Amino acid sequence: MGKFQEEAFDLIAGHLKALADPLRLRILDQIREEPHYVKDIVAAVGAAQPTVSKHLGILRRAGIVDTERNGTLVRYRIRDERLCDLCDLLMETVVNRIQRDKSAFEDDQQPFRRREKVEA
């Protein structure tokens, strides 16, 4: 494996690690259509401002989001829209799996039956 490929795998792993948090995914979902200020993201995801800021920092350091400053306000946007396609693909995969698992679970269910006591 070449040096370039190793570096690419490291970058991919860093992106996936940054995405591997439900709150960060909710944040990305919130800003996928248009940039949002931190206060608006806080209201939308229902987490405390320091928590949202911490997660936005992780996403920014990973190169997933960019910032635009307007005085003291900071607005966040997704750097590359193709990331939303990846998230959509993952969501579709998960939903399909849940539906398959639910269907398999329902097929296996039988009414509860009391076991007969075995006389010793």
Image (spheres, rainbow, N blue to C red):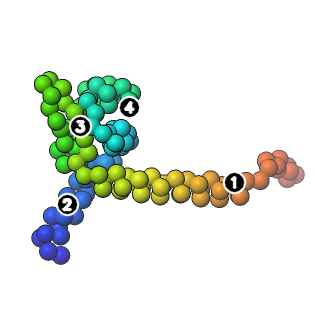
* Camera-side mark, 3 or 2: 3
* Camera-side mark, 4 or 1: 4
**Residue at left 34%, top 51%?**
84
Mark 1, residue position: 106
**Residue at left 19%, top 60%?**
10
Mark 3, residue position: 76
Q: Are marks 4 and 2 in contact (CB under 8 Å)?
A: no
**Residue at left 28%, top 33%?**
36
Q: Which of 100/34 is in front?
A: 34
Numbered circle sitting on residue 10: 2
Say which label, 4 or 1, has the lower sequence index: 4
* Dot 2 amino acid type: Asp
Residue 87 in the image: state x and y as whole percent: 37, 52
Q: Residues within 10 Å of mark 1 (few under 14, many from 20)?
A: few
- Alpha carbon distance from label 3 to label 2: 24 Å
Q: Secondary structure at mark 3?
A: strand
Q: Which of 101/68 is in front?
A: 68
- Alpha carbon distance from label 4 to label 1: 33 Å
* Dot 3 amino acid type: Tyr
- Alpha carbon distance from label 2 to label 1: 41 Å
Say which label, 3 or 4, has the lower sequence index: 4
Q: Is residue 32 visible?
A: yes
Residue 51 in the image: state x and y as whole percent: 28, 30
Q: Secondary structure at mark 1?
A: helix
Q: Residues within 10 Å of mark 4 (few under 14, many from 20)?
A: some
* Camera-side mark, 4 or 2: 4
| Residue 30 placement: quadrant | top left
Mark 4, residue position: 45
